[in-house]
């Protein structure tokens, strides 16, 4: 039998456990897996691009457990009543190849992306950070705010989105959780005085939602929305500033999909796993500007799936499903059919 967490159970687990607690716990799993980065199979995800958006497969394995996620990115979807991002994923036992855990991952991707942002901010943001600017108030935004509160204690948020209704929704969701939310009149206003700037917009374009002259010394930029060829968010001159260091997940994937796609192939970046493993420093001064050029990598999904599996095993938040046909005689697959009814010739 395969364990299965459907949408209803993922929502129940998240609501009943508390998303901030989950993001904090999941960020620990992601950190553990970044520390053992070298033990994973790694390839850039496989994207199928169309004018509508992209559908991607994200596989990885540590030799014991194999994981993959199916995820789409369709920035035009909300205008048609669909979400920009939807996903599902699985864990498999490498020893026999059987899938052992299957889960919805639309909600889980928002939790894991926030958990990754949180883990990275723990290493790169100034520990005295007090104010978060959010540019983009869509599906990922509340989770991102919770992630920054979980690791940095930030509860002051300023937000800018081109859609006023999205900002109203964010205020409605975050204020009851104890956040002090300021709705800005522009991106520039949102970013003023912020210690951490999260960009989480969706537009299939080389957009500029953050300009170089808005960024103050010491800021940590958590750039999650530029994650596809031809889809970026930052003014590229940010990356060229003397005081900026760019941190990435898996360079072969980020050079195709991240903000650095606009840069030469040898543009210098620091791999986050090396920071987590203590092999290279993260932030080196309180005035340095750190940029996490986030695109989302398969190892984070494996960590997230492991975390959910470990959390829900033996609870009412998980079901057993009959996903793999298992005949009594492993060579007699046909017998499963013929045992049930006579087969017409
Ligand atoms: P969403 O469509 O729900 O929300 C995006 C928001 O951005 C919308 O409210 C839209 O009005 C706003 N927006 C668009 N252009 C803007 C601009 N120029 N200025 C200000 N706001 C603008 O999307 P989502 O699910 O929240 O995802 C946000 C982005 O994050 C997407 O691009 C998605 O692909 C990306 N993403 C990245 C990761 C990762 O691991 N890096 C994971 C999940 C999603």
Image (spheres, helix red, strand yellow):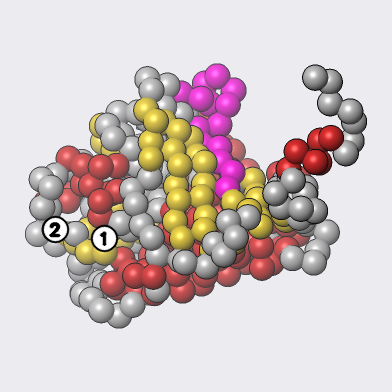
Quadrant (top left, top right, bottom left, bottom right) of the N terminus: bottom right
Q: Are marks 1 and 2 in contact (CB under 8 Å)?
A: no
> Of 239 and 69, which appears nearest the observer?
69
Residue 319 in the image, given as x and y percentages of width and height: 79, 53
Determine whether the residue tagged by mark 2 lies in a helix, strand or loop.
Answer: loop
Residue at image mark 2: 268
Rendered location of residue 24, percent (x, y) = 55, 68
Residue 259: say if magenta.
no
Q: In the figure, is residue 40 to the left or right of 214? A: right
* Residue appearing at x 59%, y 38% in the figure: 169
Q: Position of residue 320 (x, y in %)?
A: 79, 54
- Above or below — where is 53 with respect to 188? above
Q: Earlier in the sequence, mark 1 or mark 2?
A: 1
- Label 1: which residue? 247
Locate residue 116: give its quadrant: bottom left
Front position in the image: 326 or 283: 326
**Magenta segment, which residues?**
75-89
Q: Quadrant of ligand 1?
A: top left
Q: Main secondary structure of the magenta part?
A: loop
Q: Classify residue 168 as left or right of residue 41.
A: right
């Amino acid at each position: 039998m395969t364990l299965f967490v459907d949408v209803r159970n993922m929502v129940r687990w998240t609501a009943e456990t508390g998303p901030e607690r989950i993001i904090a716990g999941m960020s620990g799993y992601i950190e553990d897996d970044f520390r053992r980065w070298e033990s994973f199979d790694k390839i850039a995800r496989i994207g199928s691009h169309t004018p509508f958006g992209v559908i991607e497969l994200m596989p990885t394995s540590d030799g014991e457990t194999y994981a993959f996620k199916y995820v789409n990115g369709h920035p035009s979807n909300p205008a048609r009543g669909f979400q920009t991002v939807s996903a599902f994923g699985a864990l498999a036992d490498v020893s026999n190849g059987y899938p052992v855990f299957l889960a919805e991952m639309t909600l889980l991707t928002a939790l894991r992306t926030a958990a990754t942002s949180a883990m990275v901010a723990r290493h790169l943001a100034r520990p005295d950070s007090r104010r978060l600017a959010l540019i983009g108030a869509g599906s990922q935004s509340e989770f991102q705010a919770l992630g920054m509160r979980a690791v940095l204690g930030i509860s002051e948020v300023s937000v800018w989105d081109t859609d006023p209704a999205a900002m109203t929704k964010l205020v409605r969701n975050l204020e009851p959780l104890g956040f002090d939310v300021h709705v800005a009149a522009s991106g520039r206003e949102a970013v003023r005085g912020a210690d951490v700037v999260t960009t989480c917009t969706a537009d299939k374009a080389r957009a500029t939602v953050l300009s170089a002259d808005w960024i103050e010394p010491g800021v940590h930029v958590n750039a999650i929305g530029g994650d596809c060829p031809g889809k970026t968010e930052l003014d590229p001159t940010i990356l060229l500033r003397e005081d900026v260091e760019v941190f990435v997940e898996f360079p072969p994937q980020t050079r195709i999909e991240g903000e650095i796609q606009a840069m030469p192939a040898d543009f210098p970046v620091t791999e986050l796993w090396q920071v987590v493993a203590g092999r290279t420093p993260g932030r080196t001064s309180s005035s340095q500007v750190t940029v996490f050029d986030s695109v989302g990598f398969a190892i984070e999904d494996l960590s997230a799936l492991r975390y959910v599996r470990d959390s829900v095993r033996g609870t009412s938040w998980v079901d057993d499903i009959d996903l793999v046909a298992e005949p009594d005689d492993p060579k007699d697959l046909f017998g499963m059919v013929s045992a049930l009814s006579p087969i017409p010739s």
